[in-house]
Image (spheres, rainbow, N blue to C red):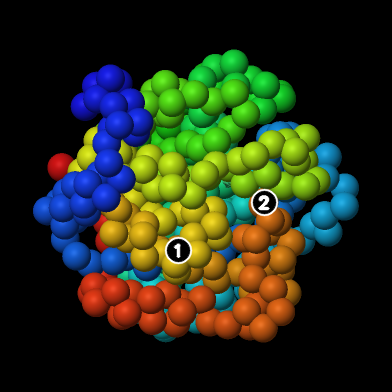
Amino acid sequence: MDKDRIIHLLVNEETDSLFQKADDVRRKHCGDEIHLRGIIEYSNHCRCLCAYCGLFADNHDLPRYRMNQEQILETALKAFNQGVRTIVLQGGEDTHFNADLLCEIIQDVKSIGDVAVTLSSGEFPRDDYQKMRDAGADRYLLKIETTNPEIYKRLHPGLSQENRIRCLHDLKELGFQTGSGALIGLPGQTIEDIADDILFCANLNLDMVTFSPFIPHPGTPLAKESGGDWLFSHKVLAVSRLAMPDAHIPCSTALASITPDDYKTSLKSGANVVMADLTPPEFVEYYDIYPGKAPTGDKKERDAVQRLKNIIAELGRPLAVNRGDSLIQ
Ligand code: SAM
């Protein structure tokens, strides 16, 4: 798919028809099964200054936490016993969780049984990624966030887009099932930029692709921006499915948090993956990357895995019982 076609689909294609096409492609290439991944947000410490993220280092109002190894293992084990076969370990860029510690955690989780481990731990040197792969990590998620170099530079002080791209190439070469994606609705971002983001992911032949709406966080420099639109975010999801028929595409947690219909539109417009937040109730509200992400009050105690299983059952689609490895040939 070329850039003009992507822009045409995003701007001109009638929404119902676009969603139907994406749903047809999803069914043909990925089947009807929905994959349920469980995410453990093990640390909200972060050395980075990403202007959109509530975890950014200058947010001194946020209480910081780190889960210990036992807590991580216990959380993963509970999810495994509920049938979850992919554990996603996500954290801020926390130097405490260096490659050696992450390797121990990977080995702990892999010792549970036939479970895939996905890391979402940010940028590391290639040698560290090699160690994590050797320790048994199967997958790695690292969003490019935006391919527009000016926007990237403006929103990521002290970071380099070249290094992020280097990380993605290293991860692919080391045999990780690799995921990337971008934020939708960043200040200054155009339709052309989004088309470039989709093409960037398609050209990398990624195993997993996530496009998420940017949701402004009141404690960040982007507090007053308007953020990504619900319908447009679904259109981007649908076009990414058309551009990347075999990729695993989740209803991102950001999209889920602005999705009033419990994932149903996303799962009917190209997505084939949902993510259950496994982070224990005592920590979950502090993984405050954007407002509305963390459950509060009664919801905090609710079982995220069971909730998603109920939604999948309501949709009449089968829940995958395998690890849901890459479909890319
Ligand atoms: N440190 C890891 C990394 O760099 O990939 C993972 C943690 S980071 C908090 C996970 C993701 O949160 C980022 O890739 C970013 O896209 C998303 N995120 C952060 N702030 C957001 C916001 N305000 N709205 C939507 N997504 C956001």
Q: How many numbered callouts?
A: 2
Q: Nearer the viewer, residue 24 or 81?
A: 24
Residue holding disc 1 = 275
User: Quarter holding the N terminus?
Assistant: top left
Whether disc 2's CB lies below 8 Å from ligand 1 is answered yes
Q: Is residue 160 left or right of residue 53?
A: left
Check disc 2: other Cα within 10 Å, few if <14, some if 14-19, many if 20+.
many
Q: Position of residue 96 (x, y in %)?
A: 72, 49
Q: Secondary structure at mark 1?
A: strand
Residue holding disc 2 = 289
Check disc 1: other Cα within 10 Å, few if <14, some if 14-19, many if 20+.
many
Q: Quadrant of residue 207?
A: top left
* Marks 2 and 1, the one that precedes in the sequence: 1
Q: Nearer the viewer, residue 136 or 142?
A: 142
Residue drawn where x is 32% and y is 60% of the image: 267
User: Quarter holding the C terminus?
Assistant: top left
Q: Quadrant of residue 170?
A: top left
**Three-letter amino acid code at the position of disc 1:** Met
Q: Position of residue 302 (x, y in %)?
A: 58, 82
Q: Position of residue 97 (x, y in %)?
A: 66, 51
Q: Is residue 299 visible?
A: yes
**Three-letter amino acid code at the position of disc 2:** Ile
Q: Quote the CA–CA distance across marks 2 and 1.
A: 16 Å
Residue at the right extreme? 60
